[in-house]
Amino acid sequence: MHDGNIFGNSFKIVSFGESHGKCMGCVIDGCPAGVKISKQDIQKELDQRRPQNSIGSTKRAEPDQCEILSGVFNGYTTGAPICLIVWNKDVDSSYYESIKDTPRPGHADFTAFIKYGGFNDYRGGGRFSGRSTISIVLAGAIAKKILLTQLNIQILSYIKSVANISSKLPPPTDLSTIHRDPLTKCIDPSIIEDIKNAISDAQHQGDSLGGIIESIALNLPPGLGEPFFDTLEGDLSKILFAIPAVKAVEFGSGFMSSTLTGSKHNDPFIIKKGKILTSSNNSGGINGGISNGMPIIFRTTIKPTPSISISQKTVNIKTLQPTSIKIRGRHDTIIALRAVPVIESATAIVILDHAIRSHIIPPIIK
């Protein structure tokens, strides 16, 4: 059975649509009944994913207006499957017809051709476009609202670094005091201008940049996660790696943990306000694949946008002859900025799925 477009156990989403097809969307199965939800709740999350009319943004001007087709009645979820769609309005596929036999380096053009025997929709990357992340944001908008209203679980993602420009700020402990710059999605004012300049320079050169996104989830109860194979880290990693351009994920001290001794890396247990917590958080809030009550902290690495206007070597898959390609079309100079709200939504989907599995969230919310 092919179920590669389905994610989740109790809060399950089915993602559908192609970049230049009629629409993008998702079906959610397992959402509790009684959740007060409106189109505006979902739209505000979609608007975060859209280009912000800033340097480095794609010129594709999609309105990305959400429609709720089923599962919501009189302003509340019914418990039935929820179908959400966004229509593709600003599509120009002409360029992709001319390069369909010359796979773009860094893209999934070649692997998709092999996987589906050439029957895949290659326009704009088809199913492998960053536009596919709309389905994650649609479902994540509902998940975020449930987690916030029912458990006060707060989730924030932000740009930690772009290229070699990195913030030295530690993860925040109070999200109510944090301002995220709308253009750079950064919370550290000291590097915002440097980021803007770096993006502008890369765009002028016809090149692209990557970045690292840091994420934090506060107020999770301990005990979420289903070892051995459905751990909290494992499920988060799975959905994060479904996001195009994600190349690495690390939790807590991550790769740096290999440089520490056990005495430095271990998180000592303490009692604070009657709760068992730890005095440090090198584990990123997860032990044994289970939340431990500390903030969930992880970082996601986003590679540079592969669509660049600099000439690159490729081959013709029909003639098997080497050639070169200079990519035209409408692309972001850096896609890490637009991935920030996607990662927030992905995080919410996983946490809600595990909260339902652990019976912390009931099937009917009143």
Image (cartoon, rainbow, N blue to C red):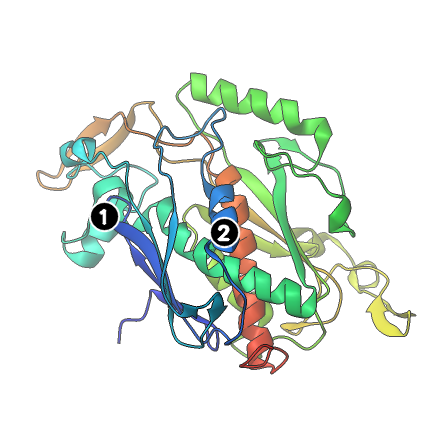
Q: Which mark is residue 118?
A: none
The answer for how far apart the CA atoms under marks 1 and 2 are is 24 Å
Between 90 and 285, the residue placed more toward the observer is 90
- How far across and how far down the image is residue 53, in percent? 47, 27
Residue type, numbered disc 1: Gly
- How far across and how far down the image is residue 72, in percent? 42, 68
> Looking at the image, is mark 1 or mark 2 earlier in the sequence?
1
Query: In this orientation, does residue 302 appear?
Result: no
Look at the numbered disc 2 and give the secondary structure of its residue.
Answer: helix
- How far across and how far down the image is residue 268, in percent? 86, 67
Quadrant containing the N terminus is bottom left
Residue at numbered disc 2: 40
Vertical placement of 229 versus 342: above or below?
A: below
Which quadrant of the view contains residue 29? bottom left
Q: Which residue is at a point 47% across and 40% down the rendered structure image?
A: 303
> Is residue 177 shown left or right of residue 336?
right
- Report the label total: 2
Q: Which residue is at a point 20% across and 36% down the rendered structure image?
A: 93
Vertical placement of 222 versus 155: above or below?
A: below
> Is residue 94 shown left or right of residue 355?
left
Vertical placement of 229 versus 301: above or below?
A: below
Vertical placement of 237 versus 23: above or below?
A: below
Q: Which mark is residue 21?
A: 1
Please tell me whether mark 1 or mark 2 is closer to you in this view. 2
Between 309 and 271, the residue placed more toward the observer is 271
> Is residue 168 shown left or right of residue 352?
right
